[in-house]
Image (cartoon, rainbow, N blue to C red):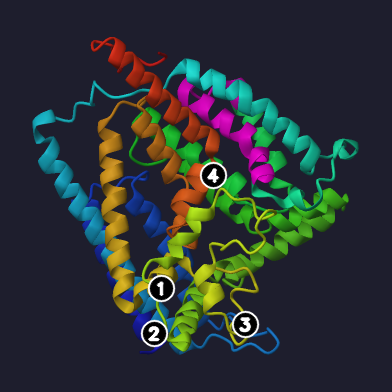
Amino acid sequence: MSLFSVSLLDIFVLVTCTVFLYKYARLTSVHPGFMYLIFHIMFFTARLYSVMRGSPTLFTDYPGALPVSEQEIAWAVLLAELGLIGMTGGLILSSQRDRRRTTHLSGVADQHDAVLSERVLRSVSLCAFPLGVVSLLVAGAIPKAENLAVDFGEWGTSGWLMVTQFWPVLVLLALIYFYGFRRGLVVLIAICLALMSIQGFNRFRVILPVIFLLITWQTRTGFKWPRKWMIISFAFFAMLTFPMKQLGRMVQRGESLSDMVSVASDSFSEVLRGTAPDQMFLDQFAATVWLVDDSGRHFYGQTLYPLLFLPVPRQLWPDKPNFSFYLYETRNPARPIYWCGMGGTIHGESYANFGLIGVPIVSFILGYWLGNFYFTAMRRSYFSVYRFMYVTVACCLVQVFRDGLNALVLFPVVNMMPLVAIAALSYVSYRRKRAWNPRYPSFVPGR
């Protein structure tokens, strides 16, 4: 099919799925279906139209590599449509299941549910916040604090050390979730996010907290959709994330403001033309499909097995399987996805595991699970452990759609460890008090 024909099909499927999700899946801006629609539009639909307007495809200027063809782009879009249809089906089915299960509840939140413990929140915060600040000072990039930096050698890149730098932000997110958007907390998290933005890597340390705050505001206020000023602000913020790594390195080198403005301006122009490297997830998906077909093999779920070795530091096991396992196994110099540190999106991972049928099936299962998670969380009280965990997972969904199912563990459990610790310890505290006193009022926050 031509790109034009595929674009017409994409619009038809996108509009149809959006209507069905709104009508039958009870779509809101904190619903996983809405998040996936945004992902599909930004990185599949928008990229398709960029290629139609003449944007060069992935590896066009890469020496010795085979550029992604328009036919491969068209095929990848068709597969993405199957993924969107599968996700929509799973979300609608979960909505219908929720309606059947909760008809007799009349929308009343569960009053016998574990809630966040204020004591646990404070204890975790008192441990994680200072540890995170120290880690940031000795291993991060902090202006005017170079004399505090410590050389940890090969352990300087260990995930166990790097994740702790993110802990001050996570503690503040938990405090804002529990106590609300108090001025002092907002000022502190703005400072911490500014520091995260100049580290020169891992933009998720800024993107995910902002999404967390947006979801928190929505669930706390009860609004189904964000205000106009929030949409405008988030659109501006999204534009800033594209040059964030480069701007962070320029701040570290002490380069002039005019040079940084010039870099940001060039980046914005690339984004508007659809030629920014971070907009080429469709191309990466197409290249991944080519690699899998060229290798003639599928993995049947083996892409998840690196999770078994996640706690082992790579410094102790240099050959530890990484999360690009399937890209390593299918690597080919003609399409150097693996060597460039790129990913295949969740659909590329699904295709690598089960072929063509894997794209809609995995999307359907993921949509059904996320839908059940969403509706169950929304039936609970705001301070419930369940809803807190949904917000934690929901803010990471963009990483799941981009990187694959491994990100469902890697980001919430590892990179957002203090939030998971607060939820887990609150649940344990609740269970112990319920065992001691069956009438313990779990719905009262602050216990």
**C-alpha gap between disc 3 and disc 4:** 33 Å
Task: Tell me the magenta residue range.
Answer: 160-185
For badge 1, the amino acid type reads Phe
Q: Is residue 41 visible?
A: no
Q: Residues within 10 Å of mark 3 (few under 14, many from 20)?
A: many
Of callouts 3 and 4, which one flags the residue occurring earlier in the amino acid sequence? 3
Given residues 191 and 289, the one toward you in this image is 289
Left or right: 8 as drawn, with respect to 58: left
Q: Nearer the viewer, mark 2 or mark 4?
A: 4
- Which quadrant would residue 417 be assigned to in this image? top right
As helix, strand or loop, the secondary structure at mark 1 comes to loop
Residue 45 vs 4, above or below: the answer is above
Q: What residue did someone put label 3 on?
A: 59
Judging by the rendered image, the residue that carries numbered circle 2 is 4
- Circle 1 residue: 299
State how far apart marks 2 and 1 are (Cα).
Answer: 33 Å
Residue 414: numbered disc: 4
Q: Which of disc 1 and disc 4 is earlier in sequence?
A: 1
